[in-house]
Image (cartoon, rainbow, N blue to C red):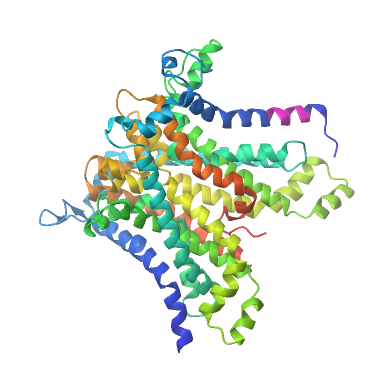
């Protein structure tokens, strides 16, 4: 292919602008998080010195957003607990459902598949009032268990649909011999299918973890006590009021960005296929 | 007999979760939207009067209007920018993998955190204005009434274009090389190859990515709530923000449900189209 010099220059320019636009918010976040307090009122674009003061105060200072006695590690831990529990439950029940939908033939199979896909696409905000009522009726208001339960409606349809697609791609012959040898369906799933499906299960788990990690709406309608806050509403609380401590706020944002960013960048090539929930073939 | 029961036992937990946390709340929302007053004795059936009130004040139609502008602008920009990046990254050059990873970063950043970053970037004395001042341009009130809508679109596009980039890139790589070779032998120009080989080959990928993104963008909450909370005034008050505001800002749960129910028809069109399309694709 021949490309004129102007064309190459234009392409390089587009990429350069895009790369800088991606960097801009991140640059400022890092800049604010690592610069010393004395820079706050200076109109500097480059920090005068580098310090981890903001991170130290967040973790050991115990007064992010003025809530005495709660370290920023608490919302970090809460978010982790919610995301890991929701993911674990979701993977277990979705493995069974996905396998059943991929392998068993039974009446209502197509209907249930569509039901799951519909739930994956359905926007949660439509349900937010009723879910608030439901959580109160269950007596779970202001509890991490409630957030975890609500996150199931985000992650379970995704995992089920994705795993169904993955199991469909595993050759049937693999478990047929096991079934002929007298193995039960459960045995065939656990001993034969799951070991070769590890990549699919892992990427479903990673996506499910990030879907739960990203959600703010369900924490917002459920949690009230500061020691139960998850990361999104902890940051939201820090960003409110007249005297926002920008350095600490950005340090907190960077801490909440790190886990999913690290997972994705390490495993990027592996999980790209899961982006559209197995909906795009090839 | 046993074979008939096993499948249902296996799918039961997932179906149960979806029914308890989606289907039941959906009916509850319909029911609530026809009532006024808190649950218990103060609650009474009011028929369609909640809907009438929503439509008469203009709050709902205004939110529909803003949601459509936000969604249309954001999805179009994401598709154009993501598509352009994908086409460029599809050619081999040095540093391509590094650049692809770099451009992918925003997709990995949760929107609530992205919102916090943009909160500093776009505020009056914030990052962007400091940089503008350095080159002699007056600061701009990015989160003010004139630019707030552009700001939430900017955040949404920043976060969302890598999704289009990656899916279109994956779509480009499965277009058979022979098609391009055949087109070249027939004397097709670069543009003709793009028009008659690349675009048709990407049709389904683009359609699915755009539909998914449309539904997600339509329902976007974190994006707007963190950055502007629907303000200033109601300039960025989309449907999701309106529902939240009515239910949890004004503590009128029934009215919030009414607004949610009323926005459902707009979604259902896209959702059913998407479900049908994806089912057809994955069965084919």
Q: Is most of the magenta stretch helix, strand or loop?
A: helix
In this rendered view, identify the residue nearer to me: B248 or B200.
B248
Q: Position of residue A110 (x, y in %)?
A: 50, 72
Q: Position of residue A176 (x, y in %)?
A: 63, 81
Rendered position, A3 above or below B32 = above
The answer, for residue B22, to whether it is visible in the render is yes
Rendered position, B81 above or below B276 = above
- Answer whether residue A198 is magenta in the image: no
Work out which quarter of the rendered image holds the C terminus of chain B and state it.
Answer: bottom right
Picture residue at 54% right of the left edge, 73% below the top: A190
Picture residue at 36% right of the left edge, 49% below the top: A125
Residue at the far left: name it.
B41
- Answer whether residue A11 is magenta in the image: yes
Q: Position of residue B217 (x, y in %)?
A: 47, 44
In this rendered view, identify the residue nearer to me: A14 or A224.
A224
Picture residue at 38% right of the left edge, 52% below the top: A82
In this rendered view, identify the residue nearer to me: A4 or A65.
A65
The answer, for residue B81, to whether it is visible in the render is no
Q: Position of residue A258 (x, y in %)?
A: 50, 40
Rendered position, A139 above or below B119 = below
| Quarter of the figure with residue B17 | bottom left
Q: Is B93 placed left or right of A216 in the picture?
A: right
Residue at the far bottom: name it.
B1
Picture residue at 37% right of the left edge, 37% below the top: A72
Residue at the far front: name it.
A60
The part of the chain drawn in magenta is A7-14
| Quarter of the figure with residue B280 | bottom right
Work out which quarter of the rendered image holds the N terminus of chain B and state it.
Answer: bottom left
């Amino acid at each position: 292919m021949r490309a004129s010099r102007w064309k190459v220059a234009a392409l390089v320019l587009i990429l350069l602008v895009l790369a800088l636009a991606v960097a801009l918010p991140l640059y400022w976040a890092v800049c604010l998080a690592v610069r010393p307090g004395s820079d706050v009122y200076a109109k500097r674009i480059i920090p005068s010195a580098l310090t981890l003061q903001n991170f130290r105060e967040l973790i050991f200072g115990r007064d992010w957003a003025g809530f005495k006695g709660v370290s920023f590690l608490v919302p970090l831990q809460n978010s982790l607990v919610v995301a890991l529990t929701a993911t674990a439950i979701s993977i277990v029940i979705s493995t069974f459902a996905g396998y059943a939908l991929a392998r068993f033939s039974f009446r209502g199979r197509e209907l249930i598949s569509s039901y799951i896909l519909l739930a994956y696409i359905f926007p949660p905000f439509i349900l937010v009032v009723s879910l608030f009522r439901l959580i109160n009726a269950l007596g779970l208001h202001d509890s991490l268990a409630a957030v975890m339960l609500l996150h199931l409606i985000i992650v379970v349809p995704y995992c089920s649909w994705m795993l169904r697609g993955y199991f469909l791609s595993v050759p049937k012959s693999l478990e047929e011999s096991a079934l002929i040898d007298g193995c039960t369906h459960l045995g065939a799933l656990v001993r034969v299918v799951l070991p070769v499906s590890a990549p699919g299960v892992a990427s479903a788990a990673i996506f499910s973890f990030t879907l739960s990690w990203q959600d703010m709406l369900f924490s917002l309608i459920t949690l009230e006590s500061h020691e139960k806050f998850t990361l999104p509403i902890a940051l939201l609380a820090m960003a409110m009021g007249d005297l926002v401590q920008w350095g600490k706020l950005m340090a907190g944002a960077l801490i909440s960005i790190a886990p999913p960013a690290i997972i994705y960048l390490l495993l990027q090539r592996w999980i790209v296929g899961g982006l559209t929930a197995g909906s795009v073939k090839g | 007999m046993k074979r008939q029961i096993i499948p249902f036992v296996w799918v039961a937990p997932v179906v149960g979760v979806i029914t308890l946390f989606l289907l039941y709340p959906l009916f509850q929302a319909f029911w609530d939207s026809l009532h006024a007053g808190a649950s218990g004795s103060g609650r009474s059936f009011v028929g369609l009067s909640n809907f009438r009130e929503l439509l008469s004040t203009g709050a709902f139609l205004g939110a529909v209007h803003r949601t459509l502008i936000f969604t249309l602008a954001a999805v179009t920009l994401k598709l154009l920018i993501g598509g352009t990046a994908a086409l460029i990254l599809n050619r081999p050059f040095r540093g391509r993998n590094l650049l692809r990873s770099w451009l992918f970063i925003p997709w990995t950043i949760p929107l609530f955190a992205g919102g916090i970053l943009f909160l500093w970037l776009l505020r009056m004395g914030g990052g962007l204005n400091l940089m503008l001042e350095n080159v002699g341009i007056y600061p701009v009130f990015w989160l003010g009434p004139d630019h707030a809508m552009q700001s939430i679109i900017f955040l949404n596009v920043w976060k969302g274009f890598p999704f289009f980039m990656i899916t279109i890139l994956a779509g480009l790589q499965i277009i058979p090389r022979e098609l391009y070779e055949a087109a070249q032998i027939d004397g097709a120009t670069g543009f003709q190859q793009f028009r008659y080989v690349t675009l048709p080959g990407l049709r389904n990928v683009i359609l699915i990515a755009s539909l998914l993104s449309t539904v997600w963008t339509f329902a976007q909450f974190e994006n707007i709530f963190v950055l502007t909370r629907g303000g200033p005034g109601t300039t960025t008050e989309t449907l999701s923000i309106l529902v939240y505001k009515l239910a949890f800002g004004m503590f009128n749960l029934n009215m919030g449900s009414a607004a949610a129910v009323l926005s459902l028809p707009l979604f259902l069109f896209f959702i059913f189209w998407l479900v049908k399309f994806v089912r057809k694709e994955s069965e084919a």
